[in-house]
Image: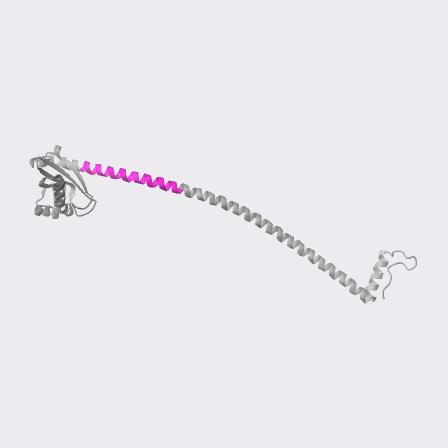
Amino acid sequence: MRSSLLNGNRGLPVSRAELREQLLRLLREDEEFRYTVAGILGYLDVLKRLEEHDRKFNEILSEIRQLREEQVKLREDFNRVDKVLAELLKGQERLWSEFNRLNARVEVTIGSMGRRWGEDLERMVLEIFREALEKRGIELGKVRKLRLRDEDGSLTGVKGRIVDVDVLVEDEKVYVIEVKSRAELEHVEALPLKSEVVGKVLGKQVARTILVAVNVDREAYERAGELGIEVVCGHVID
């Protein structure tokens, strides 16, 4: 049963209290009205939920935008770091190049110093035994350093092998002198080949091969005697 919400006597709007009373009565008595109101309330609840979903969705969109902005910033930071890293790598390559260049120079310098020190040591050993050598007819002022490189291996059997000795050249004869602070067996056994190479290169006869050393191992001393090598030394070490 559908009822009017207007004042029946005057056709004017009812008061709020009257309206509330009529609505309550309609809810109690009018089933169709109840369903209508329930539908409206359900629709309103749906709208409210949709609004809540929209709000959450907008929050998610805002967070996504923020994440994208942060991602862009991170990418920019990464690009900057990558650029800095590339510069550091270039700098490291330059440093390694400079290090290798300096290392090569140091090696050359040390090698040169080592050779000079070795030559100075040899001269000092010769000076120690000057008197003994002069008694054997060796004038130190005429002794010269001879350094040969067997490029093709035809002289020593080994390509690029270095032969480093002191020599005294007199007329058609050559004296080969090996100087050591301490002479060992391997030094003695290498001397005959050195003498042979010197003779071939200079085209002269090697008259004598002399080992000059501050100390000589007993084994080396005895081997020198077997090979016909003269030994001038300070001590023979057992």
Q: Measured from the top left, where is residue 123 in percent x and y?
A: 16, 36
* Residue 117 lies within the magenta run: yes
The chief SS type of the magenta part is helix
Splitting the image into 4 quarters, where does residue 25 fall? bottom right
Q: Is residue 74 left or right of residue 145?
A: right
Please give the name of the residue rendered at 84% of the width and 56% of the height, measured from the top-left corner.
16
Please give the name of the residue rendered at 14% of the width and 36% of the height, measured from the top-left corner.
126
Does residue 238 show up? no
Residue 83 sits above or below residue 39 on the image: above
Please give the name of the residue rendered at 78% of the width and 65% of the height, measured from the top-left corner.
35
Q: Which residues are magenta?
A: 92-121
Q: Is residue 91 left or right of residue 219?
A: right
Q: Measured from the top left, where is residue 42 in percent x and y?
A: 74, 61
- Between 139 and 24, which is closer to the camera in this rendering? 139
Q: Is residue 186 left or right of residue 108?
A: left
Q: Measured from the top left, where is residue 118 in percent x and y?
A: 20, 38
Splitting the image into 4 quarters, where does residue 53 fall? bottom right
Does residue 55 show up? yes
Quadrant position of the N terminus in the picture: bottom right
* Residue 97 lies within the magenta run: yes
- Between 155 and 13, which is closer to the camera in this rendering? 155
Q: Measured from the top left, where is residue 237 in percent x and y?
A: 13, 45
Outermost residue, top direction?
A: 141
Please give the name of the residue rendered at 41% of the width and 41% of the height, measured from the top-left corner.
91
Outermost residue, right direction?
A: 9
Task: Give the tally of numbered discs.
Answer: 0
- Between 86 and 56, which is closer to the camera in this rendering? 86
